[in-house]
Image (cartoon, helix red, strand yellow):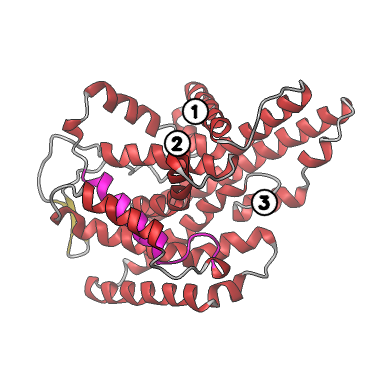
Amino acid sequence: SLVGSEMCIRDRNSTLNKGKMTEKGKSNHTYNYGLALLKNIMCFEVVLLHCSDMYDSGVLGWLSYLTSMAVPVFVIVAFYFTYVTTRKELGRRMARLYLPMLVWAVIYYIVFKMMAAGARLAGSSAADGIDVSINDFFWQSITGHSPNLNPPLWFNFVLLILTILVFLLNKIPERKRTYLLVLLFIAAIFMQYSGINMMLFGKLRIELVYSLGRITEMIPYMIIGIFAQRYLHHIKGVFWIPALISIAVIRYCGIFVNISEKSFEYAGAEIMLVSTIIFGLFYQIDGEMIPIVIREVIKKLSSLTMGIYVLHVLVNEVLCGIRIAFNLNIPKRNAMWALGVYVISGIATFLLSQIVPKKIKQYVM
């Protein structure tokens, strides 16, 4: 899955007790369909962000607004389900995060080189736009972010760094760890609003700007996920109406200070609060209320999200190449184009999952 093998498979009654993960009770449902559904929705939001222009009004306006919440929600979910205490767990988790960066850097490099060579043979001017260099491959494989290859994989790099941080924090006694997490949360927010984070990383080369600059922006979401793991099971009921009203008020009333000029796109209280509300709402969805057929669809689609995430940039480039090569009058950079990229990426992921051995697939897709 996009946030690791733990996603949506632990009992929702799991909690922390003296720093250890224990089971407070048995449950008939070990799969959180609400979070699985949320993962599917936010995966589409990522594709929409990268493959479509944004909209201001109507349903598409709301979809565009929620693109900013996709990555924060994934980070919250990741650290809700991730509790790394041993070196073995850390090593396995790091492998699951880094190997996709490396493997897909190789795949993208080879495919883009082939596409560029084909375009040159056809005498197309598009060849220069898709050609890549060893320098691109180097940065993609190290930081997960080369603008010419597969830049969204900065997410894996940041998760890897945060996972190491969580591992180190888990070596500290629980009470001291709680205080330290609160201080870390405050420090991260201060760095965002003061502009220190932008000052430190904003002038680095492009391959480092987002991979390093977004670590500070993701720390609060990591901590929200950790505290949700501890305390969210105490909250009962789904408060959809007040929650949705709160999100609408936050969006339209502009009650938070805009710090976009100091942000690497995910800083600030507005994104943080809306992402947390969304996570809480979907967490509380009762799987028994969802028809069995729908549950199976949600579960299957959820298993494809990592593949969609790593493939959608490539699929988008291939579709653009086909559009140019055959002079197709198909509008791009809109919601339907993004939906097409999402669907084709999902189909490609499913087909690859039938071919790639399971032991390899878990480290790639």
The residue type indicated by label 3 comes to Ser
In percent of width and height, residue 17 lies at 16, 61
Instruction: Please provide the residue range marked out in magenta.
Output: 263-284
Question: Residue 276 magenta-drawn?
Answer: yes
* Residue at 76% across, 20% down: 326
Residue 146 marker:
3
Tell me if mark 3 has few (under 14), some (14-19) or many (20+) residues whose alpha carbon lies within 10 angstroms of its own: many
Mark 2 — residue?
A: 305
Question: Residue 325 magenta-drawn?
Answer: no
330 lies left or right of 193? right
* Residue at 43% across, 48% down: 66
Residue 346 marker:
1
The residue type indicated by label 2 comes to Thr
CA distance for labels 2 and 1: 8 Å
Residue 207 lies, with reference to residue 5, above or below; the image says: below
Q: Quadrant of the N terminus?
A: top left
Tell me if mark 2 has few (under 14), some (14-19) or many (20+) residues whose alpha carbon lies within 10 angstroms of its own: many
Instruction: Indicate which disc, 2 or 1, sits on the residue closer to the N terminus.
Output: 2
Element under label 3? loop
277 lies left or right of 64? left
The residue type indicated by label 1 comes to Gly
